[in-house]
Image (cartoon, grey):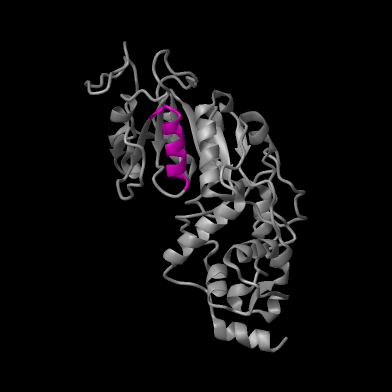
Amino acid sequence: MARAKRGCVIVRRQGETPWQGRGRGLAPRPSHQPRVRGFPGRPLRVLFVGGTRFVGPHAVREVAAAGRDVTVFHRGEHEPDLPAGVRHVHGDVANFEAHVDELRALEPDVVVDMIAFTGADVARVRAFESRAVVVSSGDVYRAFGRLHRTEPGDPDPVPLTEDSPLRAKVIDPAYDKTAVEEEARELGATILRFPAVHGPGDSQHRLYEYVKRMDDGRPAILLDEASARWRWVRGYCEDVGHAVALATIDERAAGHTYNVAEPVAYAEAEWVRLIAGVVGWEGELVALPSSKLPEPLRSDAYDLRQDFVVDSTRIRDELGYAEVVPQREALRRTIEWERANPPEKTRIDYAAEDAVLAQR
């Protein structure tokens, strides 16, 4: 039976199981073999599940600019500036089954799930015959468990590659990227392990407290001495979105797992100095033991012997990935956004910090 065309009534294939909750999730299409290529004479059809916040819009814009037919399924709460040709389907992922027939009728060649947080969420891409791209995180590595002391042991060697050991313990059942990856690998999906991402739209405001202290003319910024030398993997939102676009468009990515990360993992003190260089702050960085710092600045809850340095050689070699925004410009844009969009709460306590600085 021919697949239903857009705007037509959907007729299920004979013997096809209706979309329903069962087993690991919602029922898939009968065939799970990825269809890598689009049909001749038409552009590749791409469905994004999520993709209207932070990293997603950058990926959507790039895929659309490359001439692909793009649809974004989202709640409609955020309507970023996307190309006019991008199709929007509004709905809640919690009720995805109500929209699956409509989305299947679009006949996507690639389905990109930006918001899979548990293994059950992979049912969304499992519902299609398409090649799948699933966003994961570098926090799947056992090194993350070492860092958070949930999996004690000697630090894992760095840099971490795609073949480094993964976590065995779930830290938060509502956010379990290791389970996401387990399900995605069964489908032959492309898996992208994101770094700590900064940039306009960062809900975690990773740069804000440093920028605020600098803008307020603080003479010194306190750091935990273990944190000051600890190295961490980072990425700018537009660069990370570029990685998503490459994995979506390039069929060679099928079935592969990729780390996405900047080529240098800076120690925290080095990172603060880079921010200071853009802001124009020339104050002092003061590194002290945790025991001498105000509680919000202490890092002794973590095992910072475990650096979190990630190797992104594979995606660079196989897909030609490279950052598209110079580092200083990425920081400038992030700083500008942080200033214009301060968080409701911060951990900043200048009185407590002054008391520590006075006792040096």
Q: Is residue 359 above or below residue 150?
A: below
Question: Can residue 25 be seen?
Answer: no
Q: Quadrant of the N terminus?
A: top left
Question: Residue at (48%, 61%) from the top-left corner?
Answer: 336
- Percent coordinates x, y for residue 204 in the rendering: 49, 60
Which picture quadrant has residue 136?
top right
Is 65 part of what is drawn in magenta? yes
Is 197 part of what is drawn in magenta? no
- Percent coordinates x, y for residue 226 in the rendering: 72, 67
The reply, left or right, for residue 269 in relation to residue 98 is: right
- Percent coordinates x, y for residue 99 in the rendering: 29, 34
Q: Residue furthest top?
A: 1
Q: Looking at the magenta stretch, what is its main secondary structure?
A: helix
- Percent coordinates x, y for residue 239 in the rendering: 55, 44
The reply, left or right, for residue 86 in relation to residue 278 is: left
Question: Can residue 320 be seen?
Answer: yes
Q: Quadrant of the C terminus?
A: bottom right
Front-lying residue, 290 or 200: 200
Q: Is residue 30 above or below residue 225?
A: above
Question: Residue at (32%, 26%) from the top-left corner?
Answer: 18
The residue segment tinted magenta is 55-69
